[in-house]
Amino acid sequence: MKRQLHLCYTSDTHGHVFPVEYSTHTPSACGLLNLAAAYHKDGNTLILDGGDTLQGTPFSQYYLDHAAQWPFHPIAMAMNAAGYDYVTLGNHDFNYGYAPLRDYLNALTAQCLCANVQDLRGELPLKATAIHTLANGLRVGLAGVVTDYVNVWEQPANLTELKITDAFTAAKKALQVLRPACDICICIYHGGFEKDLETGRVLSDSGENIAVRLCEELGYDLVLTGHQHMPVESAQLGGTHAVQPPAGASRYCAIEIEEEQGRVQVTSQFKPAGNQHPKEPYHTLLPLEDMVQQWLDLPVGRLSEPVLPEGKLNAALTGSRVAALFNQVQLAATGADFACTSLGNEPVGLAAEVTMRGITAAYLFPNTLVVLQVTQQDLKDALERCAAYFTLQDGQPCIAEDFLKPKIEHYNYDFYAGLSYTFDLHRLVGQRVVALCRADGRPLGPGPFRLCTSNYRATGTGGYEVLSRCKVLWRGTEEMPQLVAEYLRRGSPLPPLAKNGPVVLW
């Protein structure tokens, strides 16, 4: 007899509860509330999520900063309304420490599965696996794991009461428990694919992403991935079906599984969140959303002139005024010798009257600052990665394919302050930095120097492994959007922002 399971799967919803685009304050067909109206649930349906839920929008940030003022957890409330059954944790869910994570999980109706997270305090409602029997009798085994790169990225203070172990080992042990007792085995993995799914080219061997290995070596029927924000509607790796939904709660993955006498068939497709939402908890949460919008529109300072949105290639070639502001903030906050920062994938600018909305649209992530001890060679090696952003086509500079496929990664190009440097695009990648000195032209010398960067980049992520080997001199706890706001409040109106970019030869 054929038995069927219908799955609705999201991942990396990143604080998107309301159907709104916060950078422009315009409606958007996205959010957990709209997903709640899109799902249709019965006894043979499970609704799952792959983590990175707590961080990512001004809404989620504002709530976490003012949580004591509200008698509910808005993200958990929205997920409960949508009917989520099982979730796992994403790396960004650890960003705020133990207590906010505990409060979220305790408010959640869904069971959190995370086989490679050990709770040393014992207050988190975590399980490694679950067996869910459907109305039709189908036994569904589920395991959750998070990329163990959390240990690399996260502030040590946020992990003092948690232990994150090897993701592959945990997924393997979980399957050994589930397979004898279940008809279908599913792994919810907050991590991505380490290989290009079309060409097989290795994208990363760091261990951050191991979805291909999970699929090819373990034997789950379905691996639900996330983390990369790289939509994969349907992939077959060995005998395992794999998907990865888009980030931001704009679409979900609808998965149909059919089992008959031990044979399992899986199909999947993306479906939109749509434009509808239930009356509740929309109206209960609306006062919080209104306060977020008011906060976003509060002016925090002024620039002497507006900064128009900067095209990605042109900014990388000639410098970015927005990046210059961020680097000024980093240098002022730390007193470092040099600073580097990156920008998001979309071109951004800043109005002359800067609001929190403008800041959060330009600086997308709640990064904190790290000061590293670096040598001249370390700086050169990091800049070689920046120089790899370019390629030449018909004698003209273009953006290299490695930064565009399999997903767009403009955020892995860094802008430096305090340095003057020259790239020669006629030279091989890895040998393109042909001049390097201080911004005022003085020789650099061997070092050591103090480089301020984000906690994200300090881990070496994005091809900057050299930085991961540098000694950490200082770690900050205040997030960059707030540091930018404080800098503007103190110094407004700021003088014209000067671009800081390379000299590029082609």
Image (cartoon, rainbow, N blue to C red):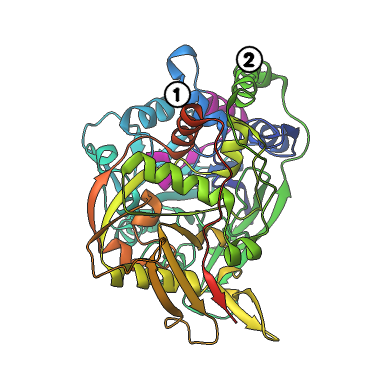
Q: Residues within 10 Å of mark 2 (few under 14, many from 20)?
A: few
The dot on residue 65 is 1
Side (left or right) of 445 relative to 394 = left
Q: Is residue 149 above or below residue 366?
A: below
Q: Which residues are magenta?
A: 74-94
Residue 459 in sight: yes
- Does the magenta-highlighted stretch encompass residue 426? no
Q: Main secondary structure of the magenta part?
A: helix
Q: Position of residue 12 (x, y in %)?
A: 54, 46
Q: Identify the secondary structure beneath mark 1.
A: helix
Identify which amino acid the numbered label 2 is placed on: Pro
Residue 335 higher or lower than 505, as above or below? above
The residue positioned 70% from the left and 33% from the top of the image is 19
Residue lying at 29% horizontally and 69% vertically, measured from the top left: 376
Three-letter amino acid code at disc 1?
Asp
Residue 84 part of the magenta-drawn span: yes
